[in-house]
Image (cartoon, helix red, strand yellow):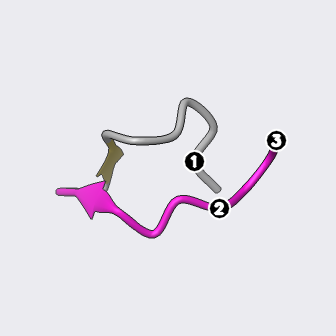
């Protein structure tokens, strides 16, 4: 499933492999 990860740490995604 492709979804936008709102959990970003210092601009780096820590949850979803594909961060938009």
Q: Point out the residue furthest to the right here.
A: 1
Residue holding disc 3:
1
Would you place residue 6 above or below residue 14 in this image? below
Single out the mark in the foreground, 1 or 3.
Answer: 3
Q: Is 17 within the magenta? A: no
- Magenta-drawn segment: 1-10
How far is disc 1 from disc 3 in space, using C-alphas? Answer: 13 Å
Question: Mark 1 and mark 2 in contact (Cβ < 8 Å)?
Answer: yes
Would you place residue 3 above or below residue 12 in this image? below
Q: Secondary structure at mark 2?
A: loop
Q: Residues within 10 Å of mark 3 (few under 14, many from 20)?
A: few
How far is disc 2 from disc 1 in space, using C-alphas? Answer: 6 Å
Q: Position of residue 13 (x, y in %)?
A: 38, 44
Q: Position of residue 11 (x, y in %)?
A: 30, 56
Which badge, 1 or 3, comes first in the chain's sequence?
A: 3
Q: Position of residue 7 (x, y in %)?
A: 35, 63
Residue 8: which numbered mark, if any? none
Q: Quadrant of residue 17?
A: top right
Q: Point out the residue furthest to the bottom here.
A: 6
Would you place residue 6 above or below residue 16 in this image? below
State left or right for residue 11 relative to residue 17: left
Question: 12 or 17: nearer the eye?
Answer: 17
Quadrant holding the N terminus: top right
Q: Residues within 10 Å of mark 1 (few under 14, many from 20)?
A: some
Q: Residue at x 17, y 57 (%)?
A: 10
Quadrant holding the C terminus: bottom right
Residue holding disc 2:
4
Residue holding disc 1:
19
């Amino acid at each position: 499933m492709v979804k936008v990860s709102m959990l970003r740490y210092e601009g780096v995604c820590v949850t979803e492999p594909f961060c938009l």
